[in-house]
Image (spheres, rainbow, N blue to C red):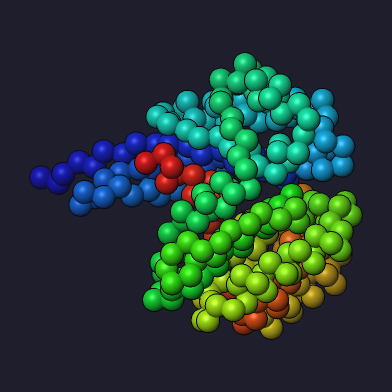
Amino acid sequence: MKKKIDIEKVATIDIGSNAIRLLISNVFSLNGELHHTKNSFYRVQLRLGDDSFKRGIISDINKKKLISTLKSFKLLMDVNDVKKYLAYATSAMRGINDSKKIISSIQKHTNIKVEIITGKKESEIVAKNDISQYVGKSKNYCFIDVGGGSTEVIIYKNGEFYKSKSFKIGGVRIINNLVDDKTWREFELWLKNNAAELKKLKLIGIGGNINKLYKISGVKYTRPLNKKKFKSTLHKIEKMSILKKLIKLKLNPDRIDVILPAGKIYYFMMKKIGVKEIYVPRIGLANGMVSELI
C-alpha cells in the first residue's frame, strides 16, 4: 500500500511597484525534508509606483484597486484551503507618507496583514531561493532582482553571504525620469568595488522582466543567456511597435514600457562587473517568501 503524502497549501503575496502577485504553493515532507512546489500563480497589474515615486502617495483609485485585488486573493486563498500566508509590500509602499494608514485599511477590509519590508530584507528573501543547479560548484555568485522601483543586489563570496544593497533604480522609476546620473554612478561604483573583483562570478537574474526577456531570447531553459544574445534581444524589442509587442511577444500591456528599461539595468550590471552571461531560474520574491513559511 502506497504511503499517503500530506500536502499543505501556503500563500505568498508580493505587492510590487508594477503588479501584485499571489503564489499558492504545495508543501510536503519527503524523506524528512520539507519541499514546496507551485500550485497556482496570479498576477494583477497595478502600477502603485506611478503614484508613490512621483508624489509620495497612493491615489484613491489605486487604493480601491489594491483592496479589491487583495479581497480576491483572500477568496482564492480560502477556496484553496491555504493554511498560512505572508504578504509583503516593497519599494512603492516604502516611499509613501501614509503607509501605516493604508496597511490598517487593507487589514480592516480584507483581513490580510501586510508588512512593508526594507530593501535589505527583500534582498535576503530573494537569496533564499534554491539556485544550486545554476551555480554548480561556483563559490562566487550574485543575485540581481530588478523591480519597478528598486534593484536588489546580493553577493555571495566563497559560498558565504558577502554584501547586499538596494538601489532606487527600476523600470517604473526610469520611464518616469526619476533616476538621476548620481544614482547610476553610485550603482556602478558599488558594483566595481564589491563584485567586479570576484573571480568566476556567476550572475543570477531575478524578476518578471528578465524571465520574459529570457523567453523571448529563445535560449533553452536552464542554459545561461550570454551578453551578445541579451543585447540582440533588447535591440529586437526596441525596434518593434507596441502592437507587435502585444501580438508577437505576447507582452502584457503593463510590461511593454518597462521591459526595456529593466533589461538595460541587467545589461548595465553585466558590463560593469565583467560577466559574459546571466542565469535566469525564473523565480522571484514570492518564491523566496515560501521558505519563510515552512
The quarter of the image holding the C terminus is top left
Asked where in the image residue 250 lies, by quadrant, the reply is bottom right
Q: Is residue 51 left or right of residue 129?
A: right
Viewport quadrant of the N terminus = top left
Q: Residue at x 80, y 60 (%)?
A: 183
| Nearer to the camera, 118 or 279 | 118
User: In this picture, is 255 found above or below 270?
Assistant: above
In the rendered image, the residue lying farthest to the left is 1
Q: How many numbered discs?
A: 0
**What residue is at 62 percent from the left and 82 percent from the top?**
276
Q: Which residue lies at the image location 70% right of the left edge and 38% below the top edge?
A: 94
Q: Is residue 206 visible?
A: no
Residue 145: x, y in percent? 62, 58
* Closest to the observer, 211 or 170: 170
Considering only vertical position in the picture, is 196 above or below 252?
below
Q: Position of residue 119 (x, y in %)?
A: 63, 48
Give the x, y percent position of residue 176: 88, 51
- Name the residue: 26% across, 38% down: 6
Furthest toward the top, the residue is 108
Regarding residue 238, the answer to whether it shows in the image is: yes
* Coordinates of residue 288 in the picture (x, y in percent): 49, 49
